[in-house]
Amino acid sequence: MSAFIAVKHPSRVQLLTDGARYDQDHVLTGVVCKIWSAARVPLAITGRGNLQVVEHIAREIIAEAEVAGSVDHVVETHLPEYVEDIRTAGVKDCDFGIAAWSETTGPAMYYLDTNGQFSTRAYELRSKDDIWCASELTGKELYDLAGARFLDDTYLDDKGAELMEIIRSKPTQGYYSVGGHCQLTTVTAKGVETVTLRRWPQDRVGSRIDPTRKPMNRHERRAAARRAA
C-alpha cells in the first residue's frame, strides 16, 4: 500500500501524502493528488487501498460537509451513519486519515480502517491526539527517525520530503508503492492548503516504482535518516 502521515498540532493538522496510483501488477498508472478537501469548511481526507473506492468515499464525505457547512455535523452526525453504511456494503482494504478544524473544539484528527489491522477495530472511527503513521515503517523506525520532533509544528514542512523519501525506500511485500510526489496538506481554522514538497520524475507511468534501483545499504539509510532529523 501507499503511505500517509497525520500529525495534530494546537494550531493546525497536517497530512503528508504521496501520489502513486498503480494497478494490480504494481505498475504506475498515474501520479495524483490523494487529498480531497472541502471549500466551505476546514476538512481534508486522504486514504489508502483501492484508490477509486477511497476517492468515492472521501468525495461523499466532503459533499456532506459542503452542504452542511459544518465539521461538527460531519463528525458527530454524518460519519457514524456513513461508516455503518460502508460496513454494510462490505468495503474492505481501505484506511483513511481525516484532518479537520471543529467549530467548537479546534484541531481534530481521525483514523478509520475497514479491516481493523492497525491497532483499531474494523470500521471504528477513532480520534487521534498526536500522530498517526500509515506506512511500512514500524513504530520504532519512526521513533528512531524523528521521535518527539514530530510534535514540532514545522517538522513536516522542513523534513516531510526526506521522511517520505525513507518511507518510499522500504518495499511492501517485494514491491515499492510510494512515489510520484510528496505533498503536505495543512488544515487550520482558515481552511485547507496543499503544497508539493518533492517530485520523483524517475517514477514513470507504465513501469513499476523503483526508487533506488537497488536496496539502500546501511550507509545510505543512515544518511537519509540524518537528512530527516
Image: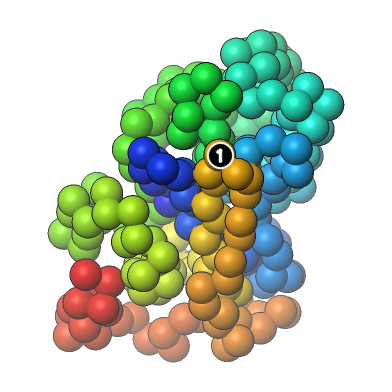
Is 78 in front, or is 167?
A: 78
Taking the spot 22% from the left edge, 56% from the top edge, the residue there is: 149
Is 199 in front, or is 202?
A: 199
Give above or below for 26 relative to 73. below
Give above or below for 118 relative to 48. above
10 Å neighbourhood of mark 1: few (<14), some, or many (≥20)? some
Colour scheme in use? rainbow
- The answer to whether residue 79 is seen in the rendering is no
Q: Helix, strand, or loop for circle 1? A: loop
Amino acid at circle 1: Ala
Is 139 in front, or is 92?
A: 139
Is 81 in front, or is 160?
A: 160
Taking the spot 62% from the left edge, 32% from the top edge, the residue there is: 92
- The answer to whether residue 188 is seen in the rendering is yes
> Which residue does the numbered mark 1 point to in the structure image?
189
Taking the spot 38% from the left edge, 55% from the top edge, the residue there is: 136
Residue 52 image position (x, y, % from top left): 76, 47
Total marks drawn? 1
Give above or below for 222 relative to 19. below
Point out the residue furthest to the front here. 190
Which corner quadrant of the image does residue 126 belong to?
top left
Residue 5 image position (x, y, % from top left): 43, 51
Which corner quadrant of the image does residue 20 belong to?
bottom right
Image quadrant holding the C terminus, namely bottom left
Residue 145 image position (x, y, % from top left): 21, 63
Taking the spot 75% from the left edge, 26% from the top edge, the residue there is: 69
- The answer to whether residue 12 is left or right of residue 140 is right
Residue 121 image position (x, y, % from top left): 44, 20
Give above or below for 179 relative to 41. below
